[in-house]
Image: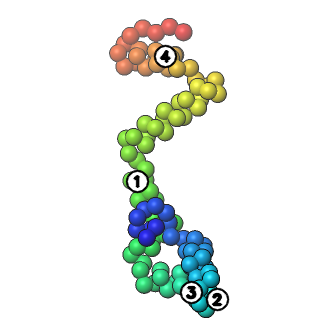
Amino acid sequence: MMQVSGESEASGPKMTATVIALTHGTKWEGQFNPDYAWRKTRAVHPEILNPVQAKNHEDRRVDWLSFKNINDWTDGVKQYLIDLGMLKDEPGIICEYHLYIMFNIPYHI
């Protein structure tokens, strides 16, 4: 359920711990191997138990590259550099030079 709902990844250690917790205190406690149950589940339902590590780079890139993610990232980096004192939140020489090159507006240093 956690894999299908997107809430979490059904990893081996997590599912093994879940099986142990579910059987604790029941007649099934210690009656079978939780690792075997996990391997069997992956074999029977591979379409829903695709580990995150199996995602290729293209899938990750497509998932990450949204307009909002890119803007959030650049805004965060800008604020981080401002906080470090490496940037000022105002136009500077590069901005003035860009205006000179693009629009032939004079700049001075």
Quarter of the C terminus within the rendering: top right
The spot of residue 72 in percent (x, y) is 46, 38
Which residue is rendered at x = 48% and y = 16% of the image? Answer: 91
For label 4, the residue is: 91
Q: Is mark 4 on a helix, strand or loop?
A: loop
The numbered disc on residue 26 is: none
The spot of residue 15 in percent (x, y) is 55, 74
- Vertical side of 3 occupied by 80: above or below: above
Disc 2 versus disc 1: nearer the observer = 2
Which residue is rendered at x = 47% and y = 82% of the image? Answer: 41
Disc 1 versus disc 4: nearer the observer = 1
Dot 4, crowdedness within 10 Å: few (<14), some or many (≥20)?
few
C-alpha span from label 1 to label 4? 33 Å
The numbered disc on residue 36 is: 3
C-alpha span from label 2 to label 1? 41 Å
C-alpha span from label 2 to label 3? 13 Å
Label 4 or label 2, whichever comes before in sequence order: 2
- Vertical side of 36 occupied by 64: above or below: above
Which residue is rendered at x = 54% and y = 71% of the image? Answer: 11
| Kind of residue at disc 2 | Gly
Residue 13 located left or right of residue 42? right
Asked if the residues shown at circle 1 and circle 4 are in contact, with their CB atoms under 8 angstroms apart, the answer is no
Dot 3, crowdedness within 10 Å: few (<14), some or many (≥20)?
few
C-alpha span from label 3 to label 4? 62 Å
The numbered disc on residue 63 is: 1
For label 2, the residue is: 30
